[in-house]
């Protein structure tokens, strides 16, 4: 296949590109296999780096369709991808294939969303530990999305689906996932393409496949209650101190159920010890 590897980025105040050096190194180290690969790291030409994310992916789609590419592989500029990511995604029998990584906002969750018979995507498999175990064992697993951190989209999809945000906003990955669901286009995730997601402070989040808590925050429980943690009901007793994910900690603190002992959580890195766990932040 002829594949466009596209990494959108922007320019910093000093004129340098905002792409992380580790991201660039992982892109340069990609195994192309027998595919013809063109790599484009494209800085946003506009002032509003957030507002023009959509235009970047619209450009990539048009470039694929106008220049005879068979597929588009997207890699975000704060992602560390394995060297065999391209070949494994390209070998997977689905028109849209996702590498695996953690969304880093609030309480980190997997980007692999449960496959459903519905016109829109479902919830992250982080919420369904039993299915997550089956997906991990199967390696390639049907999903309903999500994300452009490390994703291969075949031409046949781009011919039918435009790059558009799902409900306003800037990010078209949700729009593509929902459109694929609506049109019955198969989407899969590769659980052996594990990518590192670089946080603003340089910490690197790796996929959490063991159901362990990531980004834990220590809290003091103020009242006895039953709370939801990753889809499981947990009983909390007044007076105890415990760790819960940041998103839930903030939610329960606003409701008066707990108090945050450490408002800035220590990030727990999931994965093998030989992985990069922290890089120098790009400024």
Image (cartoon, rainbow, N blue to C red):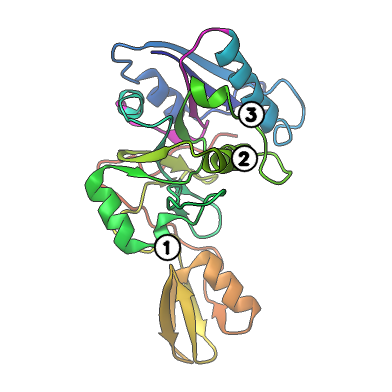
Q: Earlier in the sequence, mark 2 or mark 1?
A: 1
What residue did someone put label 3 on?
162
Is residue 243 or residue 54 the one in the foreground?
Answer: 54
Q: Nearer the viewer, mark 3 or mark 1?
A: 3
**Contact (Cβ within 8 Å) of mark 3 with mark 1:** no
Q: Which disc, if any, is residue 127?
A: 1
Q: Earlier in the sequence, mark 3 or mark 2?
A: 3
Label 2 residue SS: helix
Q: Earlier in the sequence, mark 3 or mark 1?
A: 1
Give the magenta-colored segment's residue range.
67-84
Instruction: Please identify the quadrant where the C terminus is shown.
Output: top right
**Contact (Cβ within 8 Å) of mark 3 with mark 2:** yes
Say if residue 11 shows up in the picture: no
What residue did someone put label 2 on?
175
Residue 207 versus residue 9 in the image, above or below? below
Is residue 275 or residue 46 the one in the foreground?
Answer: 46
Residue 226 versus residue 200 in the image, above or below? below
């Amino acid at each position: 296949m002829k594949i466009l590897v596209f990494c959108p980025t922007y320019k910093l105040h000093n004129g340098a590109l905002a792409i992380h050096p580790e991201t660039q190194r992982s892109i340069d180290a990609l195994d192309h296999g027998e595919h013809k690969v063109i790599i484009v790291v494209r800085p946003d030409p506009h002032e509003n780096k957030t507002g023009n994310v959509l235009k970047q992916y619209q450009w990539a789609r048009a470039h694929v369709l106008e220049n005879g590419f068979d597929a588009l592989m997207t890699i975000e500029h704060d992602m560390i991808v394995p060297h065999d990511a391209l070949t494994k995604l390209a070998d997977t029998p689905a028109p849209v294939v996702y590498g695996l990584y953690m969304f880093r906002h609030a309480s980190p969750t997997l980007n692999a969303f449960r496959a459903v018979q519905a016109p829109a995507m479902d919830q992250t498999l982080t919420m369904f530990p039993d299915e997550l175990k089956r997906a991990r064992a199967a390696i390639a697993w049907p999903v309903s999305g999500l994300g452009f951190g490390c994703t291969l989209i075949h031409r046949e999809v781009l011919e039918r689906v435009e790059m558009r945000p799902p409900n306003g906003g800037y990010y078209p990955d949700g729009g593509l996932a929902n459109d694929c669901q609506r049109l019955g286009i198969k989407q899969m995730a590769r659980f052996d393409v594990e990518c590192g997601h670089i946080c603003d402070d340089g910490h690197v989040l790796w996929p959490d496949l063991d159901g362990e808590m990531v980004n834990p925050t220590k809290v003091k429980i103020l009242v006895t209650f039953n709370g939801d943690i990753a889809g499981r009901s947990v009983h909390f007793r007044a007076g105890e101190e415990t760790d819960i994910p940041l998103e839930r900690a903030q939610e329960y603190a606003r409701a008066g159920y707990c108090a945050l002992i450490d408002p800035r959580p220590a990030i727990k890195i999931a994965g093998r010890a030989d992985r990069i766990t922290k890089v120098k932040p790009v400024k």
